[in-house]
Image (cartoon, helix red, strand yellow):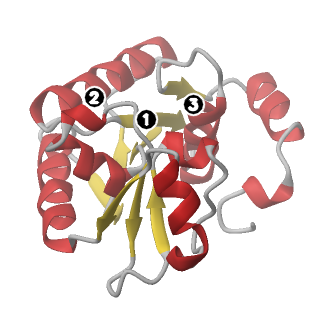
């Protein structure tokens, strides 16, 4: 099995880490020149803020609704990414860092899906405890299925943030209900 650990709303989560008073407030992070929205918290997404929207188009209405805005701080995001990856490196023998906020973990040491799910919950808890960044964990027999499992963990209401996609009937059930653009490498 392979796990994909994906930091939730990473740039916004990094900003929120040092401002716990913003726990439930909408947050957007802007591009280098503060021109466009490049990251959004869950609350900002719920307000209908789109990725890449020019800041000047939404500034007035967004701020009037209590939204918080940050200029990008890539040094901070890079440092927190290294901390997350360091925690993950201590949990498995083989890790592939995919992006600033995602890594694939080789779970060859885990033989059964129940143990894989428990590992995912443990992984999520350790990153939260040691770094303070929320993550979700998708687990599957391939990287593509781990990505899909992560997508399900993100969208599933009442989810623990961990989803293990392993049995063929389960894989078929999930895949048949996904739009083609949700498939990693296709959409």
In front of the other: label 1 or label 2? 1
- Residue farthest along the right direction in this orientation: 176
Which residue, given by chain and number where applicable, does mark 2 sit on?
123
Circle 3: element type: helix
Q: Which is more toward the observer, 58 or 159?
A: 58
Marks 1/2: CA distance? Answer: 9 Å
Q: Name the residue rendered at 61%, 52% in the picture.
A: 144
Which residue, given by chain and number where applicable, does mark 3 sit on?
153
Relative placement, left or right, of 116 versus 124 is right
Q: Which is more toward the observer, 59 or 44?
A: 59
- Residue farthest along the bottom direction in this orientation: 33
- Residue 102 seen by the camera: no
In front of the other: label 3 or label 2? 3
Q: Position of residue 25 (x, y in %)?
A: 40, 38
Q: Name the residue rendered at 35%, 52% in the picture.
A: 12
Q: Are marks 3 and 1 in contact (CB under 8 Å)?
A: yes
């Amino acid at each position: 099995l392979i796990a994909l650990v994906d930091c939730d709303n990473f740039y916004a989560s990094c900003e929120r880490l040092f401002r716990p008073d913003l726990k439930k407030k909408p947050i957007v992070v802007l591009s280098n020149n503060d021109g466009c929205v490049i990251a959004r918290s869950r609350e900002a997404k719920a307000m209908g803020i789109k990725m890449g929207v020019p800041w000047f188009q939404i500034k007035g209405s967004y701020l009037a609704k209590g939204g918080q805005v940050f200029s990008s701080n890539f040094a901070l995001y890079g440092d927190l990414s290294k901390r997350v990856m360091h925690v993950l490196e201590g949990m498995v023998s083989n890790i592939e860092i995919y992006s600033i906020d995602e890594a694939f973990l080789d779970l060859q040491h885990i033989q059964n899906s129940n143990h894989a799910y428990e590992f995912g919950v443990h992984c999520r808890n350790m990153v939260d405890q040691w770094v303070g960044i929320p993550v979700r964990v998708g687990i599957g027999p391939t990287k593509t299925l781990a990505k899909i499992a992560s997508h399900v963990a993100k969208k599933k209401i009442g989810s623990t943030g961990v989803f293990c996609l392993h049995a063929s009937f389960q894989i078929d059930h999930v895949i048949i209900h996904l739009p083609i653009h949700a498939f990693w490498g296709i959409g």
